[in-house]
Image (cartoon, rainbow, N blue to C red):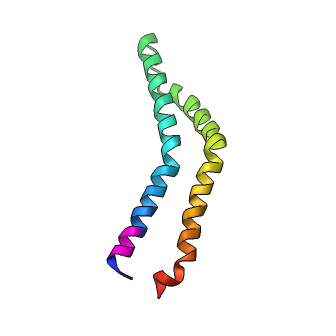
Amino acid sequence: MSAETIISIAERGIYTILMVSGPLLVLSLVIGLIISIFQATTQIQEQTLAFVPKIVAVLLGLIFFGPWMLSHMLSYASEIFSNLTRFVG
């Protein structure tokens, strides 16, 4: 297996990880920013206030983006497994 093949597999894996985790991370970031602005304007300094809305948003994001995330992960896994003999041999 050549160095280009290894780099290509690693690049595709990192890209898949970013694509799969990106929507949930952005959703959590936006909700956290909204809660932080709310806390700053109302001067509520409760540290645990942001956790519950973030958890709810991520769970709703998993419900909404779950099938899309799963299809991306499955396509990457099937690509790896279909070319396994080429990688090993």
At x 43%, y 69%, the residue is 9
Q: Is residue 29 left or right of residue 57?
A: left
In the picture, the quarter occupied by the N terminus is bottom left
Q: Residue furthest left?
A: 3
The percent position of residue 44, horizontal first and vertical second, equals 46, 15
The correct choice, above or below, for 34 with respect to 29 in the image is above
At x 53%, y 72%, the residue is 80
The percent position of residue 64, horizontal first and vertical second, equals 64, 40
Magenta segment's dominant SS is: helix
Q: How many marks?
A: 0
- Please provide the residue range marked out in magenta: 4-8
Most foreground residue, 44 or 36: 36
The percent position of residue 36, horizontal first and vertical second, equals 44, 23
| Residue 7 is covered by the magenta coloring | yes
The correct choice, above or below, for 45 with respect to 31 in the image is above
| Residue 74 picture quarter | bottom right
The correct choice, above or below, for 62 with respect to 76 in the image is above
| Residue 15 is covered by the magenta coloring | no
